Amino acid sequence: MKKSNNIFKKIADKAYKYGFISNINTEIIDKGLNEDVIRLISSKKNEPEWLLEFRLKAYRYWLTLEMPNWAHLNIPPIDYQAISYYADPLKKKKSNENKEIDPELMKTFDKLGIPLEERLALSNTAVDAVMDSVSVKTTFKEELREKGIIFCSMSEAVQEFPDLVQQYLGSVVNYRDNFFAALNSAVFSDGSFVYIPKGVRCPMELSTYFRINAAQTGQFERTLIVADDDSYVSYLEGCTAPMRDENQLHAAIVEIVVCNNAEVKYSTVQNWYPGDAQGRGGIYNFVTKRGECRGTNSKLSWTQVETGSAITWKYPSCVLRGDNSQGEFYSVALTNNFQQADTGTKMIHLGKNCRSTIISKGISAGQSQNSYRGLVRVAKNADNARNYSQCDSLLLGSRCGAHTFPYMDIHNDSAIIEHEATTSKISEEQLFYCNQRGIDTEEAIGLIVNGYAKEVLNKLPMEFAIEAQKLLSVSLEGSVG
Amino acid sequence: MSNEQEYIELFDSNRALIEEPCAELLNRERAKAYTAFKAMGFPSGKEELYRYTDVRPIFAENYGMNLGRLDVPINPREIFSCDVPNLHTHQEYIVNDTYFSKDGAEALPEGVILGSLNEIATKNPALLEPYYNVLAKGGDGVAMFNTTFAQDGLVLYVSKNSCVERTVQLMNVLRSNVDLLTNRRLLIVLEEGAQASMLLCDHAVEKIKSLSVQVVEVFVGRNARFDLCELEETHGENVRLSQLFVKQEAGSSFNHTTITLTNGLTRNSARVSLEGEGAEVNMYGLAITDKKQHVENNTLVDHVVGRCNSNELYKYILDEESKGVFSGKMLIRKDAQQTNSRQTNRNLCLTKCARMYAQPQLEIYADDVKCGHGSTVGQLDENALFYMQQRGIPADEAKHLLMFAFAGEVIDAIKLDALRERLHILVEKRFRGELNRCKGCSLCK
């Protein structure tokens, strides 16, 4: 008995290891949202006039919208005036106006396992580290620049490559797309900008690490990836936040443009603070992610491992516009305690001979609710479309829920669309087999869940895959009862 | 002015006329439904359940309603007879929305009541009180509309351990000179251990615009068994909005088949609630469409308690510019453990302009369950077509054979032998485009 108590204590202690708060001198603007706040954000970032106009247009449109309620989620009302829309952890040097990085901030990222010193960093990953509303540092920028690859924060890109940004910003996710896209377009702060020129294969993994630190703020970053003809890039995204009793809003936009014969692989390991075992606190993760395969033979692949966030509400999507283009979506979504998730994808077939694959694995434990919602649309002229969808749900415990809401809108007679979903629980036999061989139940469940999610984890880059595997086991700890 | 407002005004100004011929029970529920209808109105196309079939424009059309219960001067038995040979059913008629009194109808077994809803509710209100509008009152605006304006329909009441061996066949015949809105109401109650089967046929006689709103409430008692088969053969100007509410008790069994061969716009919704352990429901659907036909089957199987089985199979064959919608939800409530549930939806699109919307959904709150669904959209197997052509079967014929086999899976589930055989023939005729007129109908010349 005592031993088992110890085990539970250990688990409780290490449940969310990124929950610390860094004491960084952060400049936070007043709470509230109005045109002046938007002007202030824009002026702080020294933005050109067109961008301010873009923000204001989005804001005015947002004012006309109501928060949608169609998702299978129970979202407490959000007071958009009680959020501070800009928090800058970088101190300003008085002398030359250049920003310097607080050593505490460097320590924070070290603690998160994201060293910002290039000599310490993993040799094949360039990192853009974003804390609250500002990109802190981007590593390997110069090495990449030699190949013509642009990898920098969105604010820098606006200053240095305004034409590129203006050409692509909002071209995949219009500010009128949805409630949170409009909000983000109005108040977005930093994020990453990636441009891979024609014929270049990006030599290293590009990665962004998002961290929310300041209290009572929201994070509204914006990522834009453009892969020009015949290029390739693999992009990773990770995120964490401190443990707090309040709920914080994260409403980002990710836009991806894939040109002829190009390929983009976008992987996410989402580990925002999920709230405690009583369902207090945690991040609301309401993100619009969409990529457009504009060119022929282009390919876009989304891989996501979702273990964090109190509420996850996102549908990374592929618009398959170019002929012969391919879209892929691999997802593992794990919810525990009182977490809620309504996630999935959209595959919009517009070009001819496009293929899409959807593999979604949901795992619910505790009293959580986990939904898959996905759309496969085949337009009238999208001949020979092929889609395969598989959505499996695993239930751990009798108080959680697993739901599947697929939509198939087929307007073409040559399409072949398959959808298959199953729901089950971990079989007693498998557990017994593990127990028999000296593997305790907790570990056995971790093992079985990892096996169940393998199909998706295999799609992640190596370092991420190991991290994600650990994450799945940790997130499930304590859910066995 | 929104179109519900028009109906509200119509009701206000004709309330006495509507209520006058009706039983007190109907009027009492009418008052409740009217209040609810005023509050909720018609569901809009933005609502998830009505995403693909927006009913607002349908109700906005100008239809006549027979609120004064004017007699339709026809005897359906003379002008209309079912053309399915050897069916041997108890034949009942509803002309528009009025039950056609049976004269010379054959005797029913003891303990079975079959007749006009209004008549039985007037004579024996205590019998229907525990059932009428009990399930439909939880429905949406369309169900409320139906209860508000419903004046008559059919009741089938099978008392404890009674069995209706011959199938009850209800023929809904539309007969009017003006565009018509009909409001039908069916109430079917099977007490413990009772058995019955029913065949519902929708026929439209003349090429007028018509909208039939139908609400069917079914109570299947403990260990009772009920088979319901609905067959629609109307025409392109007919709109059918049907809502079926079913409550099943422990050990009961319910089989439901919906077949749409010719129609204009159809939305069939079925809400089955499994409220006793060991209950079983099987639902089958088949739609064969062309031109601008629109067929939606919207199902919800609600597993309230554990140890129940549900099985759904819906198939669509879509030709020309037709549109098919399948939206099915399996809801497994908390503690509904050891549920076995399966849902299958298969669709064939034959042309570029045909559209299919499929939405097979699972909502599961219990962990010890076996649930699965599958949905496919595709074409006929080219290898099979090639194989048959190699063996001297012309391409067209081979195509028909394959489509026939595809539809056969649903038709074979029909329990009524004569109807099943007839349907095989009807479906084949339908594929060959020969099914334009119903032979048995003397009005079709």
Image (spheres, coloured by chain):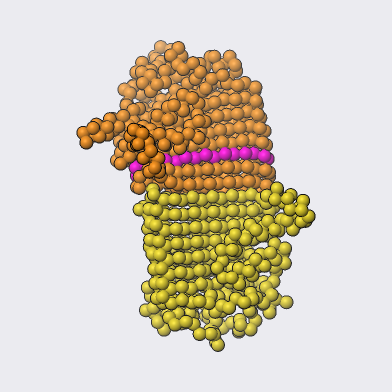
Chain colours: A orange, B yellow
> Furthest-left residue in view?
A2
Q: Residue at x 30, y 38 (%)?
A: A277
> Furthest-bottom residue in view?
B104
Is the magenta region chiefly helix, strand or loop? strand
Residue A272 in picture, x, y percent from top left: 39, 32
Vertical order, B364 against A153 (above or below): below
- Depth check: A452 or B234 in front? A452
Say which quarter of the image contains residue A323: top right
Q: Residue at x 40, y 65 (%)?
A: B251
Magenta span includes A365: yes
- Left or right of A43 in this view: A112: left
Residue A326 in picture, x, y percent from top left: 61, 35
- Depth check: B84 or B171 in front? B84
Residue B142 in picture, x, y percent from top left: 49, 64
Vertical order, A436 against B338 (above or below): above
Vertical order, A120 against A411 (above or below): above
Q: Is residue A52 visible?
A: no
Q: Is residue A361 visible?
A: yes
- Magenta region, residue range: A352-367
